[in-house]
Image: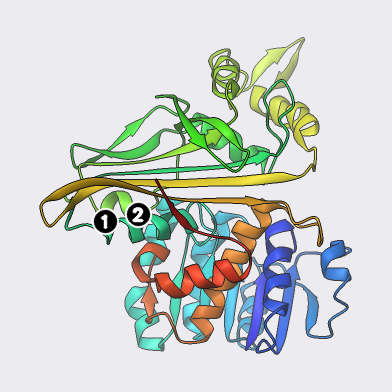
Amino acid sequence: MRMLVLGAGLQGSACAFDLLNNPAVARVTLADVQVHALPPFLQARADARLVPVALDVRDETAVRALFAQHDAVASAIPYYFNAALARLAVEAGVHFTDLGGNTEIVQQQKQLHGAAEAKGISVIPDTGLAPGMVNVVAQHGIDQYDTVESVKLFVGGLPQVPEPPLGYQIAYSIEGMVDYYTTQSLVVRNGQPTTVTALSELELVMFDDGVGPLEAFHTAGGLSTMVYRYAGRIPVMEYKTLRYPGHAAIMQAIRDLGLLDASAVDVKGQSVVPRDVFVKVAGDHLRKGKPDLVALRVVVTGTTAGVRSTRAWEVVDRYDATHGISAMMRTTGYTLSITTQLQAEGAIAPGVHTPDECMPTTRYFALLAARGITVREVA
């Protein structure tokens, strides 16, 4: 298998590392505008199969040429490039998957379904942690019931040891965090898609494994297209982000004071965007790089053979100190790698599918477990 990873950041590098652990992968091309010094866990491999390449994904001619040299492409770059890249992948007849995160763009990619089928390749957007792994777990839960009343998804990336004032460190992008805290969250209520305010409907969720109580609140994006897929069929579906208690109240106060606003204000004769200031100042404080953990839980209530019950599945993963790979990179970058390997092996049907629509769940869970990421049912 010849694999192309777009993006040499944290998630792309973790994806490349995981691909190199499969001896059946003949080459891993890691492409970015500039591929600077590789992270230590990739440098330590000194693997001749890893080929760094400079690529600007806005150059369609260069993208087409590079796609043609590979069997599958995994995109770990910002979501707004993925609609065009998926189109180019279908034209080139190469499998494509991405970390997604924007449901409107996923809907655009869905329009490529017929063309992807005709080429015999698959396109799988939204294949990270959330959306991604959590949706596959949710689908697994739904499949256990004849009828389903509610599906609730919870995911958080957290420092193992919280520090004031937010008990949080940047796990991916502070711009993304601000987006999630200021964008309406799409949920299903009474069987119909609707929106609720981010940071609202706070609740406590208890975890074992030394994690303790976490607070959960609405944020956007985690349900992906499951909102539309199950509209009219499941009365309640929602996604909430997990943080240490107290985080939401502070962030809501910051938001309500206008410090996350995207409209410029006059400050001593200078035009200043409050959001830009927050991203810069808070971002510098929150890039701690300390050992992290990922907590995930899916709770499904439904009926089987006339018996009503509630079942839950969870994942708790921690920083890999041996290789210096964060839990967020393991649960996101490795998930991207697993998905693209399944595509290249022919385990995914041709067409455009989100992970919950196409993933061979038993195999997927086994591949995660082989990497020390365990999906387990909890009482």
Identify the residue shown where x is 89% and y is 63%. Answer: 37
What is the secondary structure assignment of the residue under circle 2? loop
Which of the image's four quarters has the C terminus? top left
The spot of residue 345 in percent (x, y) is 51, 87
Residue 306 relative to residue 341: left or right: left
The spot of residue 54 in percent (x, y) is 79, 72
Position of residue 110 relative to residue 172, above or below, is below
Answer with the quarter of the image where residue 229 lies.
bottom left
Q: Gap in Å between the C-alphas at discs 1 and 2?
A: 6 Å
The spot of residue 55 in percent (x, y) is 73, 71
The answer, for residue 232, to whether it is visible in the render is no
The spot of residue 317 in percent (x, y) is 62, 52
- Identify the colour scheme used: rainbow
Q: Residues within 10 Å of mark 1 (few under 14, many from 20)?
A: few
Q: Which mark is residue 225?
A: 2
Residue 320 relative to residue 87: left or right: right
Residues 360 and 184: in front is 360
Q: Amino acid at mark 1?
A: Arg
Q: Which mark is residue 229?
A: 1
The answer, for residue 306, to whether it is visible in the render is yes
Identify the residue shown where x is 71% and y is 67%. Answer: 56
Marks 1 & 2, CB-CB < 8 Å contact = yes
Q: Residues within 10 Å of mark 2 (few under 14, many from 20)?
A: many
Farthest residue, direction top: 268
Residues 179 and 323: in front is 323
